[in-house]
Amino acid sequence: MRNKTRDWKPDSKVQSARPKVQRPRPEEVKTVPPNRSPQSASIYGVLPVLEALRANARRVDKILIAEGSGERRLTDVIELARQNGVLVSKISRESLNKLVAPGANHQGIVAFAAAANYVSADEIFNTAQEAALIVVLDGVEDPRNLGAILRAVECSGADGVLIPERRAVGLTETVAKSSAGATEHVKVAKVTNINRLIEDLKERKVWVVGTSGDAKMNYTDWDWTQPSALVLGGEGSGLHRLVAENCDVLVKIPMYGKIESLNVSVAAGVILFEAKRQRVSSSEFNVPNLQNKQDRSS
């Protein structure tokens, strides 16, 4: 019998000199050669980056600034990035030099444009079906894994994917290629805090189902016909402790061989298609009657 109780709680585990200011020339807006960086297309120079943010901030995935760069001339860039939730990080000038064409005048700043547009989390929530099926990724860093997850999400008909703004891969060209075109169809949103997102999902009466090899419940025992958010952890480390504790329930895929766990993208596909199987075979899913489900506020 599938467990729908709200009381179950998971176990707790888990310098460089200031550069001379120069007006960037139009030809300085270039893409990084494919063999120089696994990231998506780059834009460098203060004004080109600023204009890219003004034109389509949602497409800018992240911005890197060289340590020691003049802060005053970058104020507008940093402020606009903050307003639009674009990650800004500082790295050494030597590391930044490796991300652009040899001899390029990057002026201490490089922006990476995502291979596909992000949407807002609200857009995913608002377009989800009554029995929502949403995927939340807690720190997936391998672009090939993210691409494969997006492919599984698209093929299983899930509503969208939510990823953290920091310490996780974004929609790079490698992700787009690995997804086999799924980035053109799957809604992906960035969020600043996974734990706040979980609370938001609960308020929207969506059950939050985490994955853990230590879980007591098999993934097939959960009733996936209910509005559910599947939370998957990053490679190796799995779910962060607080994220696991905040989930309503933890489930596992039982292992029968000598290896302890599946790749995160494979696990996503296995669970999402189980959810789809239950929904297709359930008459309740075809004629939704959510009042008969466990009260999400209990």
Image: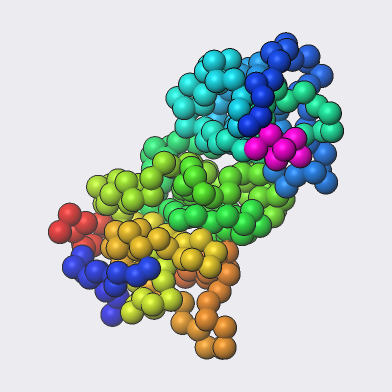
Counting from the top left corner in percent of width and height, residue 296 is at 21, 56
Residue 255 visible in the shown view:
yes
Asked if residue 93 lies in the magenta stretch, the reply is yes
- The residue positioned 75% from the left and 44% from the top of the image is 37
> Position of 51 compared to 295: left or right?
right
State which quarter of the image contains the C terminus.
Answer: bottom left
Q: Position of residue 254 (x, y in %)?
A: 46, 82
Work out whether 50 lies above or below 32: above
Quarter of the image where one finds residue 99: top right
- The dominant secondary structure in magenta is helix
Q: Which residues are magenta?
A: 92-98
Rendered view: 291 above or below 101: below
Where, quadrant-wise, is the N terminus in this rendering?
bottom left
Task: Tell me what residue is drawn at x 70 percent, y 40 percent.
Answer: 95
Q: Position of residue 169 (x, y in %)?
A: 58, 49
* Coordinates of residue 292 in the picture (x, y in percent): 21, 62
Colour scheme employed for the rendering of this structure: rainbow
In the image, residue 2 above or below residue 100: below
